[in-house]
Image (cartoon, rainbow, N blue to C red):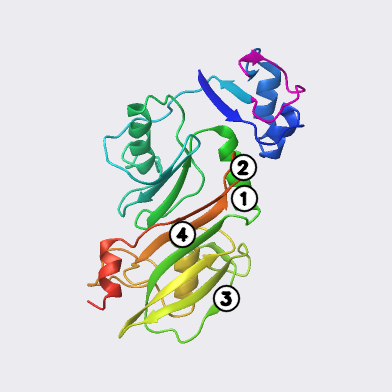
Amino acid sequence: MANYSYIIIQGGKTVLDYLSSLALGKEKIKYFNNTKDSILINDIPKSLNSKLNIGDVLTLKIEEHLDIVPLKRKISILYEDDYLLLVNKPANILVHSDGANNIDNTLANAVAYYFKNKGLDIPVRYCHRLDKDTTGLMIFVKDPLSESFIKKQIEEKNLHRDYLAIAQGNLNKNMTINKPIGRDRHINGKYRISDSGKEAITDVVVVKNYKKYCLLNLFLHTGRTHQIRVHLSSIGHPILGDSIYGDKSQLIQRQALHSYHVKFIHPITLKEIDITCPLPFDMKKLTKGV
């Protein structure tokens, strides 16, 4: 049984209002409505219709546990509190299982090991994904309300995500790429610009031009699979080292893409979280013109 506790900072709402304000799904709300003693206010069993006051401690009890196999692998933590865990994802690791060759050797498994060592018997919840060889900020959460609220911010485009990429050639002006993206019907796992695809919008800001490549700051208005990689390739400036949408490179052994900045509203405190993640060594070396 997992217990999740929340200190109420805005009074006057019912428990149902509070859960709904954090975008908790109908099925989970139904669970709390139908499960005895699953809602407590200041350790006293209550119902969805109970009122919450400032300073109250709301506890939700759910029958759930650590749900994947722990992997003994160190994680680089950028921010942590009782609800959030932001980590710096290294290259060459999947965020979660692909159901094939990488079942228990993922970042989620490493987070499971971290949770286990902290005595947290809770599921591993990630709010978005990064490609296997993309590095940088990943948001994990420790409770269902934080998960639902952050996913709502992503869906409503209120969660700000910036990437840094090193692309082939030089760009001389900033631009917005607005091209729909769909699956490539001929190559499994590859995407392409397609009139029948989903809307995809990327802002591109030139940070610096080097002799044969450029450093770009990219902001996503949408979150399509391989969006940055497809968009930059579509304008003739594929990411350096991207063997799927460009060419392999002797300068770097992966696509030079890094999730470096995220800004969003904390689900429980409602304060702004603003975190940056330093460039990994292989990309930093290239920014020095080496």
Between tags 4 and 1, which lies in front?
A: 4
The Cα–Cα distance between marks 1 and 3, rounded to whole angstroms, is 22 Å
Q: Is residue 30 above or below residue 194?
A: above
Q: What secondary structure prevails in the magenta region? A: loop
Between tags 1 and 3, which lies in front?
A: 1
The Cα–Cα distance between marks 4 and 2, rounded to whole angstroms, is 19 Å
Q: Residue furthest front?
A: 55
Amino acid at circle 4: His
Marks 1 and 2 close (CB-CB < 8 Å): yes
Number of the label disc, if any, that sits on residue 176 = 3
The residue indicated by pointer 1 is 153
Residue 95 screen position, x and y as percent: 40, 46
Q: Which residues are magenta?
A: 42-56
Mark 2 surroundings: few (<14), some (14-19) or many (≥20) residues within 10 A: many
Amino acid at circle 1: Gln
Q: Is residue 266 magenta?
A: no
The Cα–Cα distance between marks 1 and 2, rounded to whole angstroms, is 6 Å
The residue indicated by pointer 2 is 149
Mark 1 surroundings: few (<14), some (14-19) or many (≥20) residues within 10 A: some
